[in-house]
Amino acid sequence: MKVEGDGMAGTTAQKILDGYFDECADFLRMGETIFDLWLEALETYDRQLFEEVINSAPNVEKQYSKVLTAFLTTISLVLPVGKTLRKITGFYDMVNDTFNLMANLRKASELIVILPDLHRAIPADIVKMARLVRRMYDTALIVAFAADDHLEMAKQICALDNKVDVYERAISSELLKTQTERSFNLLKAVGHIEEMGDICTDIICKAVFAVDDILCFCYNDTLIISEGHNL
């Protein structure tokens, strides 16, 4: 995206803007990397991988702080308007959501990693639920960085969130049959994963806003645009 301006001032503003989007992209891609690491930990019952996810927190916080600095710098020095401002704020909201998503991912890991015999402790449906959420996040990034079918993809994500909720209810119902520390920890972990699904729906709506200037949100697993019409 180009910034209006002539000569040195325009060049400097463009560099600041490009740097901001680079910081956002780095953070969002880091979310992908940590997400994949966490999903591998779930799929392979690998305690060490869960520890890596948990220990990623300082780097997540450092990168998040860099985005905040870049955001404030861009707002104060570039003073963008219209489409540029929309994209800046849209991406910043996506970064905030991804930060919260990774916090929930880490909390789920902290609850799971303390369980004895991970292979037996993690129900297969939790892994399936996590894969769905990972697919939702991946689709949100496709909308942010690719060019077509944004609203249709957002609609699909809202529908996937319904499947995540179905898994959450089924898993919770099964876990509630036993009153053990394992079941209580897994219940909390499943709650965090379900919240991650909700966050993904918010991320994709922010992505649609950033790239298409369309305000939308998910309600009852249906995508609704700002005018109030169901798609």
Image (cartoon, rainbow, N blue to C red):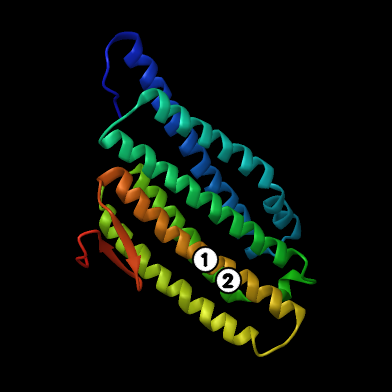
Is disc 1 in contact with disc 2, using a CB cutoff of under 8 Å? yes
In the shown orientation, is residue 92 left or right of residue 209? right
Q: Which residue is mark 1?
A: 195
Judge left or right: residue 100 versus residue 56. left
| Callout 1 amino acid | Glu
* In front of the other: 73 or 207: 73
Q: Is residue 160 visible?
A: yes
Tell me if residue 193 comes above or below residue 91 in the rendering: below
Please state, as top left, top right, bottom left or bottom right, where the C terminus lies in the image. bottom left
- Vertical order, 216 against 2 (above or below): below
Amino acid type assigned to the residue bearing label 2 in the image: Gly
Residue 147 can be seen, yes or no = no
Q: Residue furthest right?
A: 116
Residue 41 x %, y %: 66, 59
Residue ID at (39%, 27%): 17
Name the quadrant containing residue 108: bottom right
Where in the figure is residue 76, as x and y percent of width and height?
42, 27
- Secondary structure at badge 1 equals helix
At horizontal 44% and vertical 42% (from top left) the residue drawn is 92
Q: Residues within 10 Å of mark 2 (few under 14, many from 20)?
A: some
* Disc 2, SS: helix
Identify the residue position indicated by label 2 in the image: 191
